Amino acid sequence: MALIHSPRDLLPIRHTLRIGVTGLARAGKTALLTSLAANLLARRDIAVRVAPAGADSLPRFDVAAHRAALAADPPRWPARTDSVSLLALDLDIPRPPLPPRKVRLELLDYPGEWLLDLPLLAQDYGSWSAATLKRLERRAEADGFRAFVHGLPAGTADETLAGTGAALYADLLRRLRDGGLTLLQPGRLLMPPPGPAPPWLALFPMVGSGPLAALMARRYAAYVAAVRRDLAAPGLGRIDRLVVLADILTALHAGPAAFDDAAAALSAVAAALRWRRAPAFVPGWLAGLLPLGGIGRVAFVASKADHVAERQRGNLAALVGAITGAQSARSVHLAIAAMRCTEDFVWTLEGRPVSAVRGRVAGQGLVGSYPGEIPDKIPGADFWVHPFLQIPDFEPVRLPEGQRVPNINLDRLIGFLLEDVL
Ligand SMILES: Nc1nc2c(ncn2[C@@H]2O[C@H](COP(=O)(O)OP(=O)(O)OP(=O)(O)O)[C@@H](O)[C@H]2O)c(=O)[nH]1
Ligand SMILES: [Mg+2]
């Protein structure tokens, strides 16, 4: 460990490192934050404590309640969360003979829907509309909305018409989400920001060049400006490192259309992050002022990796890499389980031994699972001939307070995120 990483290390103040943890609903954000906190708090080599909330504006992540759920008998998963929250930990890292390095880690539980707004920063209204309408062509759910858009009269920018279109589109996004799709934009239509809805949220894709299209283009521009503002805001923005969680196993189970859509979403996010990351020659203080420019490291993570055996986890990580194109000093792709609930075992299925996992399922006791082979690249048509099975809802392992949470590859994630800190 280097004694000094940067000149500010010599100052007797605590500096803050903010890590965004993002992923779509149920991707495993809360489980990851709880496990990270429990494992850092259980460390003996550094002093770690939950930082006081002070006069902060963001709600605090309730570590104590989430850990208590795991310590209960029977243990329960941490409850669902539906708002942004912040977990702050103060770390004192010894480095004799110098005084300890003082770092505040701020971990932000960031909605995945908002992550899907990043690609919009590089698109204008016309190209976003064209791409979105094209994707909708193949979806039966979109029939009503498509008919509305094609039937729009030329030459009016009527507020009522705009309102009808926006309501139809927002409803369509919700139905597509329920149908298992991921690439749903703008994300704030599905996960609105706190407070009353501003008029520019009433937005939908359309083609043409009349006054209504011009109104939509203005709303889109206002939307993108708000996304940009949020990224630089002291509350939600200013993220130094980012973890993008993806539940790839559930996407594989959902079938080719849903999987391709999820992969397209993840790949668009990865491209937006690559495009926005400040080049190496831009000094840190300046990079922090650029939109997204301050994000120095990104980890793309397949979650719930304890649902497959060791042999398959390499493929799972490789698949995330193939989708995101991530692999550089500043990005990694990993398969992790924030809370490992299973053990590997060899299962004989139809006379053939397969590497499977087993864990406890409420009401059923110990259950074996072998969902199928994980492809190590984006799967083609032959993969989908054999359906990928649903992963069971394993119970978490009971965890007495103060203990480390069993996991897979969490140390690698921490090592990557905090390489220059620990
Ligand atoms: N086996 C296993 N299951 C996990 C793991 N992490 C999460 N899960 C499962 O996934 C569910 C969702 O995890 P959460 O951490 O609540 O996901 P989230 O992204 O915070 O979800 P929302 O708050 O609803 O957006 C959990 O209730 C578990 O059933 C893991 O490491 N292993
Ligand atoms: Mg959550």
Image (cartoon, rainbow, N blue to C red):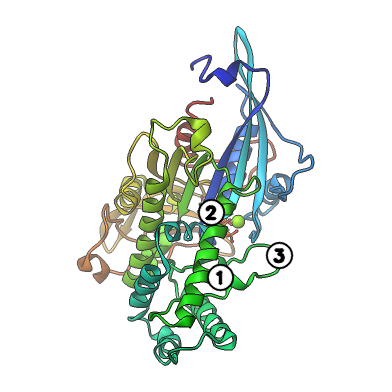
- List the residue tagged with mark 1: 189
| Mark 1 or mark 2, earlier in chain | 1
What is the quadrant of residue 194 in the picture? bottom right
Residue at 51% across, 61% down: 224
> Which quarter holds ligand 1?
bottom right
Q: Nearer the viewer, mark 1 or mark 2?
A: 2
What is the spatial separation of the Cα atoms under label 1 and label 2, in whole angstroms?
16 Å
**Residue 401 seen in the current view:** yes
| Mark 1 or mark 3, earlier in chain | 1
Does residue 345 lie above or below 42 as drawn?
below
1 and 2 marks in contact (CB < 8 Å): no
227 with respect to 343 (left or right)? right
Callout 1: few (<14), some (14-19), or many (20+) C-alpha neighbours within 10 Å? many
> In the image, which disc is placed on residue 228?
2
Residue at 55% across, 50% down: 231
> In the image, which disc is placed on residue 80?
none
2 and 3 marks in contact (CB < 8 Å): no
Residue 195 rendering spot, x and y as whole percentages = 71, 65
| Mark 2 or mark 3, earlier in chain | 3
What is the quadrant of residue 258 in the picture? bottom left
Name, please, the residue furthest toward the left.
382
- List the residue tagged with mark 3: 195
Callout 3: few (<14), some (14-19), or many (20+) C-alpha neighbours within 10 Å? few
330 with respect to 225 (left or right)? left
Name, please, the residue furthest toward the top.
97
What is the spatial separation of the Cα atoms under label 1 and label 3, in whole angstroms?
13 Å
Q: Nearer the viewer, mark 2 or mark 3?
A: 2
Q: Camera-side residue: 386 or 257?
A: 257
